[in-house]
Amino acid sequence: MTSSTTDELVETFLRYQHLFVLTAPVLFVIGVYTVAPTPADAGASYWFEYWWLLPVFMLGATIVNTVGISGSALFVPFLIFLFPLVAQPLSPSEIVLVGLVSESFGLSSSAFAFVRYGLVDRRLAVSLVVGGLPFVVGGALASFVIPETVFYALLGLALLAASYLLFNADLGHGDHADDADAEFDDGADAEAVADGGGHDLPDDDDKPGPAGVETDADGVVTRVDNDGNEYTYDRAGYLERFGNYSIGGAFQGLAGFGIGELGIISMLRTNVPVRIAIGTNHIVVAVTAVIASLVHVFGGAFVDFGHALDLANVPWNMVVFTAPAAAIGGQIAPYVSTAVDTETIKTGVGVLFAVISVALFGMATGIA
């Protein structure tokens, strides 16, 4: 296959990625319905019992993907505090599993959307996934043996840290190094830049619009998204990012979130532009969420102690609604991020995390 043919296929996939991405949850639901070990008397009432989770998880996925954090950071507290008010309580392992499966679809969906926009640094993403994965697996295996009170305490600690980090993070989107409208005096020049011309910017054949990326001999990256916005940065700071992503990875495996919240802060501290940080973070969190989900589903077969999760007890009638909902929310998020003040969303989520963490500490100590 020639390079031009490959570029054309990649561009076609990115241009229509929403069609491919939204097919995945449909195939997932069909697979669950046909092969998942469900109760023998599972009929229509079983499969449609939790239909109302569809709009709830769609809204949650849109919010978290807009600011680039883990979906489980909202899904898990919802399943702990609100879900039991209208349904039966879930065990910690079931809560984390539902959150992770839903997050996997939501973040994977949103990740492809950010790739299409040209806002993902794939080299950074690969290094972060490889560095964080062992900690994710370790945290997921630890979840089988950690007592419930300790689980709630660690969850509260993770949310409190996430709240603090969100309040101290600048998630404004006007951060590209050379704003096209400010750099040139007249509209014609700005339009030329948006078209990938008039200014010597990278323009890759395998990316929609004027998007492209190049790295010079000094390691300085110049990236253009498909709206023509330019970002200039380098990839220095691997050690700091590794520290944050390893700690966050352990929480990701244990509780379903943490790597996204800690990770994006480390990218911002190492001068990665915020929109690139958010887009790249989506890839890292999506991959680690998928791996953590697999460990939570199948890891019990290798752990002969603790509260291993039996596949027959997985709430399949929940995930058939939460997974598609998260995938749809993931596709909506990139559009919301350009239309809504992300700082407002960030502040609201940070306050919510702080309140939930207090309640979780209360549950851990037996007060709540």
Image: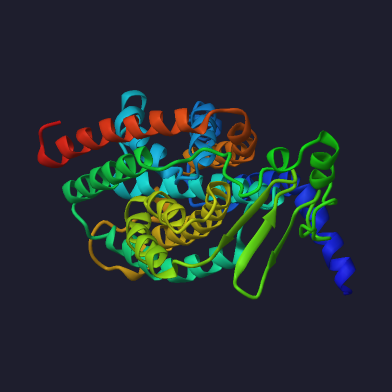
Along the line of sight, the residue nearer the viewer: 35 or 273 = 273
Judged left or right of residue 150, residue 164 is right
Along the line of sight, the residue nearer the viewer: 118 or 295 = 118
Which residue is pictured at 89% across the width and 67% down the height?
5
In the rendered image, the quadrant that contains the N terminus is bottom right
Can residue 341 be seen?
A: yes
Looking at the picture, how far across and down is residue 129, in whole percent?
49, 66
Can residue 314 be seen?
A: no
Looking at the image, is 270 positioned above or below residue 210? below
Which residue is pictured at 15% across the width and 42% down the height?
364
Judged left or right of residue 222, residue 100 is left
Along the line of sight, the residue nearer the viewer: 124 or 134 = 124
Looking at the picture, how far across and down is residue 152, in whole percent?
22, 44
In the rendered image, the quadrant that contains the C terminus is top left
Looking at the image, is 355 positioned above or below residue 279? above
Along the line of sight, the residue nearer the viewer: 18 or 240 = 240
